[in-house]
Image: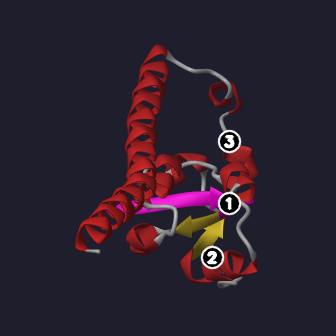
């Protein structure tokens, strides 16, 4: 996986790496620098950026990543997370600022879902319209 000599990383240290130019995530108590993988991530860079600087273990497992994805993590390995550095008080508290950020993200994804639905609808509708027009043209030609 990586060197056994890697130093333990603190939650505070990892939290500083939370942007597209410097993106670290924690998965199963291991720290990964996924900065160079952002734009190659099959789920899109937004998924990784939302987890940037945080523990993304639950999201990683829920996404159903297979053995190939788990092997890819090896190349991004930075170190182990020091569990004693986790700030327990702040893990279950949503501040008003965080609540507004969450609301904005929900709105952002609702917009994406709407666009995705429109695209799916058009992918369904356009071929039907083309077939309809082709059948009308064939009736006139024959």
10, 60: nearer the viewer: 60
Which residue lies at the image location 70% right of the left edge and 67% below the top edge?
Answer: 65
Q: Nearer the viewer, mark 2 or mark 3?
A: 2
Q: CA distance from mark 1 to mark 2?
A: 9 Å
* Quarter the N terminus occupies: bottom right
- Residue at image position (44%, 33%) is 110
Residue 73 shows which numbered tag?
Answer: 2
Relative vertical location of residue 86 with respect to residue 39 in this rendering, above or below? above
Q: Main secondary structure of the magenta part?
A: strand
Identify the mark nearer the N-term, 2 or 3.
2
Local packing at callout 1 (Cα closer than 10 Å; few below 14, some 14-19, many 20+) is some
Proximity of marks 1 and 3: CB atoms separated by less than 8 Å: no
Q: What residue sits 57% from the left and 21% below the top?
A: 94
Q: Are marks 1 and 2 in contact (CB under 8 Å)?
A: yes
Task: Specify whether residue 2 is painted magenta.
Answer: no
Give the mark nearest the N terminus, 1 or 3.
1
Count the marks: how many?
A: 3
* Residue 63 position by quadrant: bottom right
Bin the neighbour count of mark 2 within 10 Å (Cα to Cα): few under 14, some 14-19, many 20 and up. Answer: some
Q: Judge the density around disc 3: few (<14), some (14-19), many (≥20) Cα neighbours within 10 Å.
A: few
**Which residue lies under the disc numbered 1?**
27
Q: Which mark is residue 86?
A: 3
- Dot 2: element: helix
Contact, mark 2 vs mark 3 (Cβ under 8 Å) = no
Which is more foreground, mark 1 or mark 3?
Answer: 1
Q: Residue at x 50, y 53 (%)?
A: 47
Q: Quadrant of the C terminus?
A: bottom left
Please, is residue 50 above or below residue 8 in the view? Answer: above
| Residue 69: percent from left, percent from top | 66, 76
């Amino acid at each position: 996986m990586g060197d056994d000599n890697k130093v333990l990383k603190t939650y505070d240290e990892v939290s500083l790496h939370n942007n597209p130019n410097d993106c670290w995530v924690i998965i199963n108590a291991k720290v990964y620098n996924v900065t160079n993988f952002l734009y190659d991530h099959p789920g899109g860079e937004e998924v990784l950026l939302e987890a940037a600087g945080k523990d993304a273990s639950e999201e990683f497992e829920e996404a159903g990543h297979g053995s190939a994805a788990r092997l890819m993590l090896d190349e991004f390995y930075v170190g182990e997370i020091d569990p004693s550095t986790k700030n327990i008080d702040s893990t279950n508290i949503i501040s008003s600022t965080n609540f507004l950020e969450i609301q904005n993200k929900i709105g952002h994804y609702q917009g994406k879902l709407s666009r995705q639905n429109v695209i799916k609808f058009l992918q369904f509708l356009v071929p039907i319209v083309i077939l309809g027009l082709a059948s009308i043209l064939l009736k006139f030609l024959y």
